[in-house]
Amino acid sequence: MECTVSWTGALGTRSGMGFVAETGSGHTLVMDGAPDAAKPENGGQNLAPRPMETLLAGAGGCTAYDVVLILKRGRHDVRGCTVRLDAERADVDPKVFTKINMHFTVTGKGVPAAAVERAIAMSHDKYCSASVMLGKTADITTSFEVLEA
């Protein structure tokens, strides 16, 4: 796996904190920093997600992918899956994630809660590389609800 991240500055200037990531699979992702009122040249323009938001979103995508795949392999009629991630970060550098809650909402026809619980646990404990990695610094908790389609 590879990725190249390039500083773009602010709207083509060499101030600001905009970045473009080009992934090995040929996709691009734009990131930006938070505005800094005290030193505008050191801040972003709030034009894209922050890098740490992108990391959190990646973990959500990784685990949701697992949950859907596990449920489908179990021949469950899953029709939707969302995961809301709420995270807290350390107050001092490096400001790693210290707590993350992942709340899954799975929609389907007759999908048993036990199957969803098992899929989440399997993702969290074994398959989701992002969750396992973030779990080295963060206490990760999960919750879920199942909605009938």
Image (cartoon, helix red, strand yellow):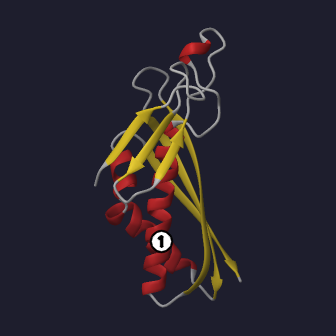
Asked where in the image residue 87 lies, by quadrant, the reply is top right
Lateral position of residue 126 relative to residue 50, left or right: left
Q: Position of residue 31 (x, y in %)?
A: 53, 38
109, above or below 4, in the image: below
106, above or below 99, in the image: below
Dot 1 corresponds to which residue?
A: 67
| Residue at the limit of the structure toward the top, as seen here | 38
Residue 63 appears in the picture as rendered:
yes
Q: Position of residue 38 (x, y in %)?
A: 63, 8
Q: Position of residue 89 (x, y in %)?
A: 50, 32
Q: Residue at x 44, y 27 (%)?
A: 95
Dot 1: element: helix
Lateral position of residue 45 relative to residue 21, left or right: right
**Residue density around tag 1, few if under 14, some if 14–19, many if 20 or more, within 10 Å:** many
Lateral position of residue 136 relative to residue 34, left or right: left
Which quarter of the figure is the N terminus placed in? bottom left
| Residue at the limit of the structure toward the left, as seen here | 1
